[in-house]
Image (cartoon, grey):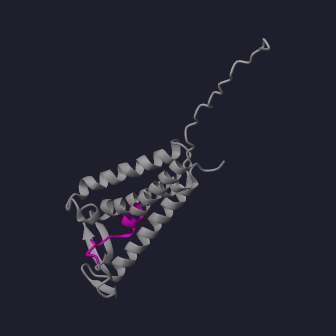
Amino acid sequence: MRAKNPWFWLVATAAVALDRLTKVWAVAQLAPGESIALWPGVFHLTLVKNSGAAFSLFAGGSDWLKWISLLVSIGLCVYALVGPHLGSWEQMGFGLLLGGAVGNGFDRFAFGEVTDFLDFRLIQFPVFNGADIAINLGLACLLIGTLRSESRTPAPARPASKQIREPTDTTGG
């Protein structure tokens, strides 16, 4: 018996594993607030703790955010198990969303805040993490899947045109 939506489960597992490994590494290598320039002025590793949602929105809201992460995670798992067989792009997209929700949700439940460390300074972007990347890639995969399925959907069939036949003269004249 094959698992339903296998790419969903594989991608979600990989996203959670990568997120956890990179966060553990960042915490072991950096002190809170410490920054290491990998490309000075462009990309740094900067360890920060975020008690809010993406990009520090709703700072201090980790109590209710952790429950939202849990509900989203459960909902995605139920959908993958009992919902339709999904296309590859949809499986990857929902799998990445699950991986991101579990990754940041784990931090919220275990530590009360999310570990962020990827710091793009060139564009003054808020510090983020692997789970945030997974969520954004997941949304991109879902968009691609939607666009691809729309382009493959056949146009509605048009009724065949009726041919108008002239009555034939059977009288010979």
- Relative to 59, is 122 on the left or the right? right
**Relative to residue 66, is residue 127 depicted above or below?**
below
- Relative to 38, is 76 on the left or the right? right
Magenta-drawn stretch contains 131: yes
**Relative to residue 20, is residue 74 depicted above or below?**
above
Q: Nearer the viewer, residue 165 or 34?
A: 165
Q: Position of residue 135 (x, y in %)?
A: 39, 61
Q: Nearer the viewer, residue 96 or 107?
A: 96
Q: Nearer the viewer, residue 105 or 85?
A: 85
Question: Across the whole image, how many numbered discs are drawn on residues?
Answer: 0
**Relative to residue 105, is residue 173 depicted above or below?**
above
Q: Nearer the viewer, residue 150 or 100?
A: 150
Q: Position of residue 59 (x, y in %)?
A: 20, 62
- Relative to 24, is 64 on the left or the right? left
Task: Say which quarter of the image contains residue 114.
Answer: bottom left
Task: Say which quarter of the image contains residue 133.
Answer: bottom left
Name the outermost residue toward the top: 171
Name the outermost residue toward the right: 172
Magenta stretch, residue numbers: 123-135
